[in-house]
Amino acid sequence: MERKVDALVLRTADYGESDRMLTLFTMQYGKLSAAAKGVRKAAAKLRFAAQPFCFAEYVLAQRRDRYTVIGAAGTDGFYALREDIGKFYAAASLAGLCDAILPEGIVNEELFLRAISALREMCEGDEALALIGFFIKALELSGYMLDLAACADCGAVLEGKVFFDAEGGCFYCSDCARGAGVSESTLHVLKACAGGRSDAPLTSDGKKRALKLLYAYFRAKTDAQVRAVTEYIRLL
Ligand SMILES: [Zn+2]
């Protein structure tokens, strides 16, 4: 049986002499593994389709529960992500997060579309902001909402110095103070990336801390590790 899918390459693993196993995030069937034969040969026609972050329409042959890539038409290779180390690690973080969040075979069309648009944003603009925005959305779609508007205890508007409890996933005002302190610049970045309005400048320190906070929350909730995120935080 053949299946046509829109998919993003989340992970690759070489095997055999020139083959590669792909972990694909497909829009139609969720995450699945597919073998890509001979794609590490220099002249292989499907070489492009077996690269990290390749977004393409794949034709998969299915035999029982195994898939093999038999064709692909490239939609976007996101080549700009491979020419800049920061962008590369931001994209690898996004792919790693999708991989960690998604169970095999569970369809999540919204997360898929968000991932594609965040990769586009990373190519064209500030990759850190694109990653943070995607991270907040991915957590939300996994059931881990972040309420950036109000203190979880007294309901006061969050501004100035606030606190975040990664276990509970809640922010607190400075009077209720629970968890670790969150700087004003971090809160600005989080609010701006969550789609809120922020007139304050978004500093690189704020981006770094925002990413650290989201990753601490993600680790507390999922127990999963995404090495690329740690690497990217180090680069910021
Ligand atoms: Zn409070």
Image: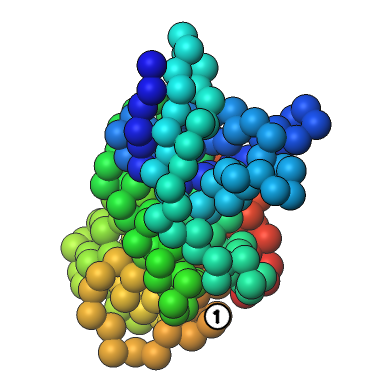
Ligand 1 within 8 Å of disc 1? The answer is: no
Residue 192 in picture, x, y percent from top left: 31, 75
Q: Is residue 173 left or right of residue 228?
A: left
Residue 37 in picture, x, y percent from top left: 64, 31
Asked whether 169 or 203 is in front, the reply is: 203
- Name the residue: 68% across, 60% down: 231
Q: Secondary structure at mark 1?
A: helix
- Label 1 crowd (10 A; few <14 / some 14-19 / many >=20): some
In the rendered view, would you say 70 is above or below 221?
Answer: above
Q: Is the N terminus in the top left, top right, bottom left or bottom right quadrant?
A: top left
- Residue farthest along the top direction in this orientation: 64
Q: Which residue is mark 1?
A: 205
Residue 27 in picture, x, y percent from top left: 32, 40
Q: Which image quadrant is residue 150 in? A: bottom left
Asked whether 85 or 7 is in front, the reply is: 7
- Name the residue: 52% across, 31% down: 69
- Name the residue: 48% across, 12% down: 63
In the rendered view, would you say 32 is above or below 222?
Answer: above
Asked whether 155 or 144 is in front, the reply is: 144
Amino acid residing under circle 1: Asp
Say whether residue 101 is visible. Answer: no
- Residue farthest along the right direction in this orientation: 17
Q: Which image quadrant is residue 159 in? A: bottom left
Residue 208 in picture, x, y percent from top left: 55, 72
Q: Is the C terminus in the top left, top right, bottom left or bottom right quadrant?
A: bottom right
